[in-house]
Amino acid sequence: MSSSVAAAPLIGRDEELARLTGVLDRARAGTAGAVLIAGDAGVGKTRVLDEVAARAAGSGMTVLTGHCVDLGDVGLPYLPFTEILGVLADDERFTEALAAHPAVDRLLGAGSDADRDAGGRLRLFEGIAGLLADLSDIAPLLLVLEDLHWADQSSRDLLRFLLSRGILQRPAGGSPTHRLAVLASYRADDLHRRHPLRPLLAELVRLPAVERLELRPMADAEVARLVRALRTAPVPDGTVRRIVERAEGNAFYAEELLAASDLEAGGVPSGLADVLLIRFEQLSDTAQQVLRTAAVAGRRVEYDLLRDAIRLPEDELESALREAVERQLLVPGHGDTYSFRHALAREAVYADLLPGERSRQHGAFARLLASRGHPAESAAERAHHYRESHDLAEALAASLEAADHAQRVGAPAEELRHLETVLDLWSSVDPAARPSGEGIDSVALTLRASAAAAHAGDAHRAVSLTRSALAGIGRDTDSELAARVRYTLAGNLMGVDSLTAAFAYSSEALAMIPADPPSRTWVWAAATHVLAARQVGEDEIALRIARQALAVAEELRLTDARADLLISLATLEKGGRRTRLGRERLAEARELARRSGHAPVEMRALFHLAIGSFESGELAESLPWLTEGLDRARRAGLLSSPYPLEMRYLQLLVLYTLGRWDECLKAAASDAASLPHAGAFTMGPALYVALARGDLGAVERARALLDGPFDWMAVMVSSIALTDAGALRGDPEASVEQVRTAVAALTDDSGRRPDLTVRLAALGLAAVADRAVALRLSGDAAGVRRWADTATELVELARSVADAGGEARPQGPEGQAWLARAEAEWIRATTGTDAAAWEKTVAAFDYGDVYELARCQFRYAEALLAADRREEATAPARTARQTAARLGAAPLLAQLDTLIRRGRLGDPAPDAGDRPSPLTAREQDVLRLLAQGRSNRQIGEELFITGKTASVHVSNILAKLSAASRTEAVAIAYRQGLITPEATTSG
């Protein structure tokens, strides 16, 4: 890659920074303290110290930093302290303080002279302690010592004195200690058992004023953020995933891997390899031999297997292992196993082997594993070792065995990986040496791999593999297999929203197999054709084929196919899954699928039961179905397949709609760690919560969903969030453009617009109405007419979609509510707010959508006030306020407090109205514009100040609110009631 590299940001470490900042705060208040910061090489100790030092300097502290350096056996005494004193000597501000402690001159002038006699040594220690104390009297002082693992003995002794008897000890009488903090870092992975720093650390951590802080590896999500932040251009998702997997939470490793990301997969950058091999090369020859052999075995190796492979006497092997463990290259594990402490260390050792050594060692491990019998659990290991030893026939057989095992235990991603290895090896192995049996040919195996890809949530890979299977079909291919390939391709194409092509392939599949005599292949071809016909709007064809295929499935006693067809009929017939009868049919299908053991069909039934309950307005009823469906998916290893992903989204959506927002966020956080990239849309309801709580950072997270191939659900979720965000930011242009773009993208090949259009139009209309109201107040009649035209365009769009379903597919409670809101917003935009329209909308949302009900109650109360019906306005305004407060919906809460205060509907809550503000009047003005998304230049233009002055005001606001960003400042201000967005925020 050739994209430029950005400066490494500090990502994560919030808890660690908070703890260290607390130490600084206490030091500034007069309570000295020290923190010993431990962490592996590259984990980010220096970056954290740099950040803390910058914060300390920004708060007025004097920061002094000394570095320990690895100089082997010729270390210079007191090196970090000499560095610190050199900095002080070069700064005339400290001349007087240095002159008051002449003993320290020995370090400035003569290095090792300090150790000539015990008395001189004590005077030196006391002199440095006194100097630091005096400096802390001038200004609070932060002393940073880096890389203590390389500290010389004299520096360790001086540090012991300073922390145990010098600057941290409390004077007699309990008076405060010095305004001083000491932060010292060291590499935990360098501290072998006999390392000289170990006893000092054990002694220091027992002191009351000394803490220990361990910097653990970063979480995977944080590493991913770091990798993306390091490049100014986008980093491919595959590259990010590989780096995250290999870096194992180490920031330095991640940076090095990114810098070398144009290397072939699996390569270790040469600079990183050199770093990783330093400790390895310090081992004895025998220990190095043991680690090389262990590296061939993999990250983890059993003792018995290693012993048989290396053929050393046990006492020599155990001695070598002990040496590797002490040097923290290997870690003993459960079951008499040993693992490399970091995967990249193993890779570096492995890469250092000669090609012939690798091949021979892999062959030895493969034969050892094979000699133990053929347990399925070792198939993947055997496949790897056979392949690396160039025994391709054995590698092919073992890979197929590993795929079978992965399928049995419900691991589709691993099954796919092994099947792709089989397909990769297939043409390189002599036909006579290939495995044989039913379903073992290249087309059937490719088809099986496509199913594994679909179950693993990689829909685009599934399509690619099925197309490959189709390309492999010859004239002599069995017609049933040819039909299976086509209807499988049709199913996979529906998964990537290529609906016209799916219908074409399902039509071909059905035409290839005669309906008579009845066959399982024809039934499943028909079941797939039903789904494809439904997707392109051919409901009559779908209904006719479904009824015909159901009769054949019953005749052949195909329980799983019967279940699948019953689901289709339940969604096709009048009223569909919203009716009680439809859901009874779905429950019957779910029971048939459960009895047949067909997990994908069972999950499809459970999904439709859940969404049918949701669409009919029975929200709480959908949750048990979703719980059961996700549990079934978990037991089958199919959590990443399409229906479970949609169930995850629906579960969060139900919690969001019911107003159980904290539960929604907790479930989203729990899901995030296990989701495939293609399933990121399931986090959508968590974005809706974030926006409703004033976190406009959700905008970028919503846009990120659109990265990668087109995904219908991702576009849907992103569009909802971005359209609403435009209204929240007072940007109707962005909202309207988002509605138009989304509807165009989500309209299917037959020209049928999605039901979602009604909701998007209503949200866009809210932004348009806000602008029209503002223009009407300012007397801009032309502007009002322009936005009224846009409002009419959007409401007609909503009406057309709502009417399109007709009697067969009428709008459910949710759709009716959004249509009512679209109508009310249209009236507000074109002629002014109307109480009757908003009363109707409030009633419509009373089916259970807590937040939207509150937003509409706000508009209803506003309309009542405009109609001079003050007493009637009080109840909806107060009810909505209670909801907004309970949800933490700060922007809506601020709107309601303003309405209640201006409308004299009662006193606003004490936490929202007239609390003293930490901001000046000018800063309040800037903050209000900041909440509208204005840049510094725009703020300056509106307030008649320069952009630079606006920037100063913004910086002051961030500091006063303890916010790290403009977005966070706005969110804090909303929560604290410091701003009350009026036309800037849509209800």
Image (cartoon, grey):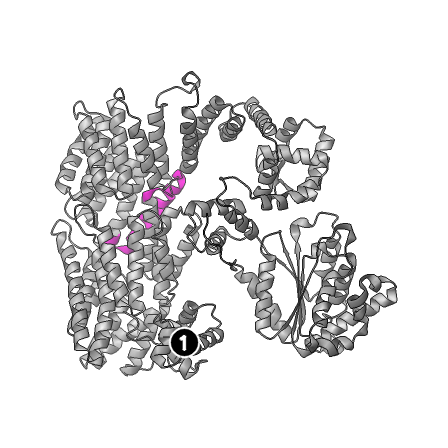
Q: How many marks?
A: 1
Secondary structure, mark 1, is: helix
| Horizontal relation, residue 420 to residue 166: left or right | left
Which residue is drawn at the image coordinates 16% and 39% (left, top)?
542
User: Given the current orientation, which residue lies at the most extreme front position?
Assistant: 2
Residue 299 lies, in percent from the top left, at 57, 38
- Residue type, label 1: Gly
| Horizontal relation, residue 802 to residue 333: left or right | left
| Horizontal relation, residue 962 to residue 734: left or right | right
Nearest the eye: 453 or 630: 453
Q: Quadrant of residue 406?
A: top left
Q: Is residue 597 above or below residue 843?
A: above
The span picked out in magenta is 614-642
Nearest the eye: 610 or 2: 2
Nearest the eye: 956 or 882: 956
- Asked if one can make out residue 531 in the rendered structure from this viewpoint, the answer is no
Q: Is residue 205 above or below residue 543?
A: below
Does the segment drawn in magenta span residue 617?
A: yes
Which residue is drawn at the image coordinates 40% and 54% (left, top)?
667
Q: Is residue 930 above or below residue 659?
A: below
Q: Quadrant of residue 716?
A: bottom left
Residue 378 lies, in percent from the top left, at 52, 29
Q: Quadrant of residue 756?
A: bottom left
Magenta stretch, main secondary structure class: helix
User: Given the current orientation, which residue lies at the most extreme top position?
Assistant: 432
Which residue is drawn at the image coordinates 44% and 75% (left, top)?
951
Crowdedness of circle 1 by 10 Å Cα count: few (<14), some, many (20+)? some
Residue 670 lies, in percent from the top left, at 43, 52
- The C terminus, quarter of image: bottom left
Residue labelled with disc 1: 947
Residue 33 lies, in percent from the top left, at 67, 68
